Amino acid sequence: MDQGAMKELVGKKAVETMVKSGMKLGLGTGSTAMPAVRQVGLLLQQGILKDIRAVPTSFQTSIECEKWGIPLFSLNSAEIRGELDLTIDGADEVDPRGCCIKGGGGALLVEKVIAYASKAYAIVVDETKTVDHLGLKFPLPIEVIPEARVSVSRALESFGGELVLREAVRKAGPVITEHGNLLLDLRFKEPVDPAVLETELNRIPGIVENGFFTRLSPRVFVGRADGTVEIRG
Ligand code: 5RP
């Protein structure tokens, strides 16, 4: 099974296992979260799921939900009141404790707000995303306000990694997030403590959010090339 097929498999499995009618549902961003979104849409169209109120994490998710007729709400709306039953999202890396790096798709800010507002959290990944230590292979995305690009870069020098301003594709210059910010990608050279850094990085003025997600106990669905899905947590 190739990586695309693993993503399809795991997205569907997470929805079938965890989504129930009547849920307030956070929906993630990326190529592994999209099959989960489509599965929610399909089950709604078939009448198997009913009364789903979804909160999207990005434009990508909103557009996919619109295509499938999935009812969309803001986290602030009276129907949601800032709390979700479940969020399903992808990740760039997952460690054995269920801590993640997210933000490869640039949507980490709302992804984190929604994840931390959810009573239950499910991560969907293919087996290439599981690692022993976060941030050595996939760099940690850090969202910064444009005015703080250089000052934050200087402050991050003491963390000893390799720092890159994320460049856009098919647009000249850097990626601009959906909230008007820039992304710095920090690859560590040595293992770090993600739980400590998640808090510490956000103390640097100008950092809006970072892509370590460590304060959740997700159920992690890992799609494998042999066609099976391992469920952790
Ligand atoms: C977007 C994310 C994605 O969930 C993460 O990048 C994984 O994406 P994909 O499933 O396409 O590999 O955090 O900000």
Image (spheres, rainbow, N blue to C red):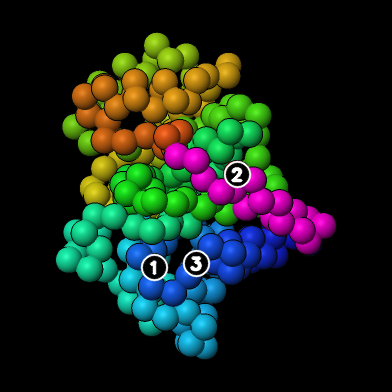
Q: Earlier in the sequence, mark 2 or mark 1?
A: 1
Few, some or many residues within 10 Å of mark 1 (<14, 14–19, 20+)? some
Query: What is the quadrant of residue 205 in the picture?
Result: top left
Residue named by callout 3:
19
Q: Answer with left or right where residue 33 lies relative to residue 112.
A: right
Quadrant where the N terminus sits is: bottom right
Q: Is residue 158 magenta?
A: no
Vertical order, 166 against 80 (above or below): above
- How far apart marks 3 and 1 lie (CA) works out to 7 Å
**Identity of the amino acid at label 2?**
Gly
The residue at 53%/62% (across/down) is 18
Few, some or many residues within 10 Å of mark 3 (<14, 14–19, 20+)? some
**Disc 2, ligand 1: is the CB inside 8 Å?**
no
Q: Which residues are magenta?
A: 216-232
Residue named by callout 1:
23
The residue at 23%/48% (across/down) is 180
